[in-house]
Image (tube, rainbow, N blue to C red):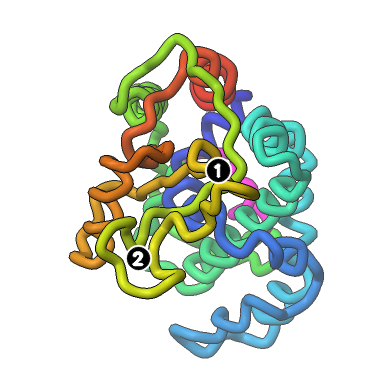
Amino acid sequence: MGVEKTIGKSIARVLLGDLFMNLDFMSSLVQKTSEGIDWIYSDKQRTSEFIDWIHSDIVDIAEEFIRKNDLNRASFIKDMNTVFKTDRFVSLLNKWVIEYYVKLFRVLDNPPPELVLERNPLNQFGLSKYVSKFNNKINIKWKRQKYFYKIASVILQSLVVLYLSMNRGVVISRKKKKYKVMREAIWGLYDVRGFYFHDDFLVDGDKVREDELLLFSRGVPLEEGRLKGYHDAIKSPYGHFDLQRIPVDVKTLLSRIISKYII
């Protein structure tokens, strides 16, 4: 848990933007190939020794850091695997560390007169690997970790999650009703031309009855054409809900939001 907290600030700024991007390609990024890191040639002409080292050792370095700090079993990775019913977040963790070290090593290979780095296990391990390989002297100003800001950040993120979950209201329970067809309210229901260009064309009173159609909207549409569908659905006898106005129920709040994203 200590390592998780100390690496959080440094790795998150650079890598969290890719958290849910290209999940199908994560595994390929942890293989010992040059694919995906061709951009290391940019900025300045790298030495062949540096390029060969990145291509051959970057995955081993990342995996060694993860293994030594037992990050494969970090609570964040386990929780995300559970929430999304997958095991791909282990590969995503490898991708994060690989991308971070490629960026770090590029800076170390062409450092400014005084390089400022946060003193955390991620940076210290990467620096030790680079120096042991190239024996370069780098003037580093170590920046102390600001635990107060990290704790405040964690608390703020939890408050944001709670606000986004509860800003549409909280209900104790919901009445459940079964529908046969659910579709988005797009065209409208009344004064619409064409046989199929109305949102309830499936309702025939036989296979689909009036009480078996559920219409939904994605908020108040900005397009004038869809606005008719929104207003017609509201005043119709059909079931209707707005995705942007659904309150959260207490059971979901406790079991899926607070337990998985806050505690």
Q: Mark 1 or 2 closer to N-term?
A: 2
Residue 23 image position (x, y, % from top left): 66, 59
Residue 32 image position (x, y, % from top left): 81, 71
Residue 147 image position (x, y, % from top left): 40, 25
Q: CA distance from mark 1 to mark 2?
A: 75 Å
Does 171 sit left or right of 15 as displayed?
A: left
Region rendered in magenta: 119-129
Quadrant of residue 171 in the image?
top left
Q: Residue at x 25, y 56 (%)?
A: 221
Q: Identify residue for label 2.
A: 113
Quadrant of residue 34 in the image?
bottom right
For the C terminus, give its image quadrant.
top right
Residue 20 located within the stretch drawn in magenta: no
Does 156 sit left or right of 130 as displayed?
A: left
Per the image, label 2 sits on a secondary structure element best described as: loop
Q: Residue at x 39, y 34 (%)?
A: 144
